[in-house]
Amino acid sequence: MYQNKVTLIGFLGNDAEVHTANERSFTTFQVATKSSYKDKKSGEYGSHTEWHRCVVFSRLSEFAGTLTKGTHVQVEGELRSREYTPKKAVGSKSKKAETKQRIWEIRVASILKLDRAEKSAPEDQEQADNTGEDATF
């Protein structure tokens, strides 16, 4: 049995970007996750932020395109790697530009927004509270 499943909970680093390639639409965004640790020598606490590139296809891509910087999300998908050759910069003689690069991405299967729902108008809230008190079971 094999399993390639990733679950990330973090915040978007910037607005999601919708792209089209080969007549196929997809959305990309970056999710930041953070871990904390205690330095054994100094005894001080530190933290490390990791950035994850996420790619979304199909109908979920439409929803992902609405996500904005700072949105708190839970993303599930599978870890994928791919190789590409970066476009050579004009006038660049660097050999590094000619070598293949490997990039790791999360191919997203589901997205859950963890942000709290925006508050409704005060009169809507009062009406919702009143109906809860009068309900009979």
Image (cartoon, grey):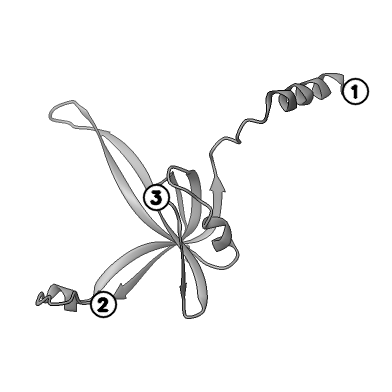
Which residue position holds label 1? 136
User: In the rendered image, which residue does mark 3 sit on?
Assistant: 14
Q: Give whichever of discs 1 and 2 has the lower sequence position.
A: 2
Dot placed on the residue nearer the N-terminal end, 1 or 3: 3
- In the rendered image, the quadrant that contains the C terminus is top right
**81 on left or right of 87:** right
Q: Position of residue 46 (x, y in %)?
A: 23, 33
Quarter of the view holding residue 85: bottom left
SS label for mark 2: loop
Which is more N-terminal, label 3 or label 2? 3
CA–CA distance in space, label 2 to label 3: 25 Å
Mark nearest the camera among 1 and 3 is 3
Calculate the distance from the C-alpha at mark 1 to the C-alpha at mark 3: 47 Å
Contact? badges 1 and 2 (CB < 8 Å)? no
Q: Amino acid at mark 3?
A: Asn
Left or right: where 103 falls relative to 106 = left
**Residue at the spot 36% in from the left edge and 54% down from the top edge:** 52
Residues at discs 1 and 3 in contact (Cβ within 8 Å) = no
Could you tell me which secondary element the residue under label 3 belongs to? loop
Task: For mark 1, give the secondary structure.
Answer: loop
Residue at figure coordinates x 51%, y 75% from the top left? 24
Tag 2 residue: 85
